[in-house]
Amino acid sequence: MTDPSNNSTASWRFHVVWAGLLCLAVLLIARLLGLQVLESERGREFLLEQGDRRAVRTEQIVAHRGMIADRNGEPLAISTPVVSVWADPTILSQHLDSLPMLSTVIGIDQSVFQARVKRMAKRRFIYLRRHLTPVDADRVKALKVPGVYFQQEYKRYYPAGEVAAHIVGFTNIDDKGQEGLELTYDGHLNGVPGKKRILKDLHGSLIRELDQIQPAKPGENLYLSIDLRVQYVAYKALKKAIKLHHASSGSVVVLDSRTGELLAAANQPSFNPNNRNRLDPAALRNRVVTDVFEPGSTVKPLTIVAALESGKFTPDTMINTSPGHIRVGKKTLLDPVNYGTIDVSKIIKKSSQVGTTKIALQLEPEVVRNVFYKAGLGQATGTGFPGEGVGVLPNHRRWSDIERATFSFGYGLSVTPLQLAQSYTVFANHGVKKPVSLLRRDTGVEGVAVTSPKVADDILTMMQSVTEKGGTGTRAAVKGYSVAGKSGTAHKAARGGYSENEYTAVFAGLAPVSDPRIIVVVVVNDPKAGQHYGGQVSAPVFADVVENTLGLLGSSPDQIGDYKPAQLMAGRI
């Protein structure tokens, strides 16, 4: 028989529970009404803020990196839009059945991909693929794999490829400058990222963009002094010579002699900045600006500047070079043949070691060194290029006779190709050295006087004879244009002295002599195949570059037949 008291207790408990639930419901409704209707504006803002914290995110808007262009506006480095794919492994690891199709579309080995996702299952971020084209990114988006997201980015592209790689440099995968002018002017090229608000669901998937907090500010464009047309000319001529002479490396510099602007800086070996998968670190060097070498006889014109300034010599001063060699200390310095008694002009034309030595030994060594220094050797060119070489210009407390002699014809000091080219602006501008620039100059630039106009012009006339019949640089001659220059051949330094069979072949000069427009320096390291002299190896490259460059720049021929520029200018024909 059922106890009535038990039924009463159960009924009482039921009503208590029911009343409690009813009270909770009433309190919940009251709270909701209070929050939605009765609460203050401040309370509602608080609730909205709490909701936004769970669903609204602030994301960065990637800024467009500025373009690098040549002096005529031709692009050398541009940024193109790409999409990077990333994932939240905590979500993606729960959808392993989607991995085979995803790995196929983004081009990742399926087994490797699956193992990676499992290994990183507790992480919240991994990149799946960087820098996909928008088309490829759309293929990934179409899969609608949970936990996979997309990020707008930019990828750097270099239209000129390896032709201008050394001067332009490159960026890393995050679009930050790593080499060359990309690194030097990274702050200038970089933009300022913007900010935007977006709405995401509980899984982190984008629902929609809400608004833009701050627009992205694109980076500034950079206009180089480089003329891409001239750069192609220099690059092609150098590459051909390196192959022909089986040389290890080389450089070509082309300067605007009036403004000091660098029109071309070609190097071998080179690299493709658009594909650096098998990059040789040695190929990264912009040898024009960073590498140093002993310039050999190409500095003899500067030695003769010191001689003429001393008042002890004139272009017509006779020097006895017989019997074709001279003993200095324990060394014997040789000329190819016995030139006998020749004037100072012919010492340059024939590149006489004996004649240069006899002149140098009559000058104080500091006099020659000071001319070298004023012409820009032994000091930075001030381009700001990463790793810019300064070279070595010794300043001994006491100079031995052999040091004085070899220094005068380019041993015992080192220069960069760009420094050597700058020093020749002295001869192109009547004694005034021009500062060099890797950026386009829209206004004229002042120079620094190194020597008198008469001395500079006298040396220029001597250097013109080098490219004429009987000179050491006849292969540098260019039909229709007057050319002045100097060849140089230096033994390469080796342990304990100098190598007997390794050379640096150099030719430096300018054209046209009547109104100098360009300065060209060609350096070829360790040429083989039976030829190693600057007049044999580098002079033809010089002629090729000069002829094509003057044509591109619209410089009119100044030489007709055997007549020299001075005769043309004087109206003698």
Image (spheres, rainbow, N blue to C red):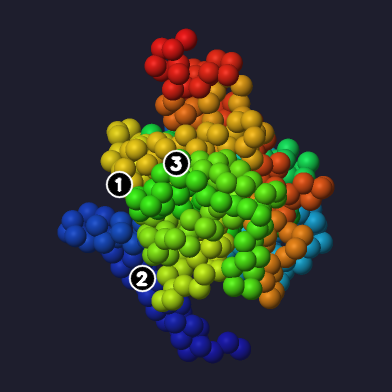
Which mark is in front, 2 or 3? 3
Residue 6 rendering spot, x and y as whole percentages: 51, 88
| Residue at the farthest top position | 573
Mark 2 lies on a secondary structure that is helix
Q: Residue at x 59, y 16 (%)?
A: 561
How crowded is the residue under tag 3: few (<14 C-alpha within 10 Å), some, or many (20+)? Answer: some
Inspect the image, locate mark 2, and give the three-letter code of the amino acid beneath it: Leu
Does 483 sit above or below residue 399? above
Inspect the image, locate mark 3, and give the three-letter code of the amino acid beneath it: Pro
Q: Residue at x 50, y 38 (%)?
A: 462
Closer to the camera in the image, 431 or 528: 431
Inspect the image, locate mark 1, and give the three-letter code of the amino acid beneath it: Val
Mark 1 lies on a secondary structure that is strand
Q: How many angstroms separate mark 2 from mark 1 (CA)?
A: 92 Å
Res. 277 in view: no
Residue 24's disc is: 2
Residue 567 rendering spot, x and y as whole percentages: 45, 18
Residue tagged 3: 315
How crowded is the residue under tag 1: few (<14 C-alpha within 10 Å), some, or many (20+)? Answer: few
Q: How many angstroms separate mark 2 from mark 3 (CA)?
A: 113 Å
Left or right, 131 with respect to 199, comes to right
Q: Which image quadrant is residue 547 in?
A: top right
Residue tagged 1: 448
Res. 257 in view: yes
Precedes in sequence: disc 2 or disc 1: 2
Which mark is in front, 3 or 1? 3
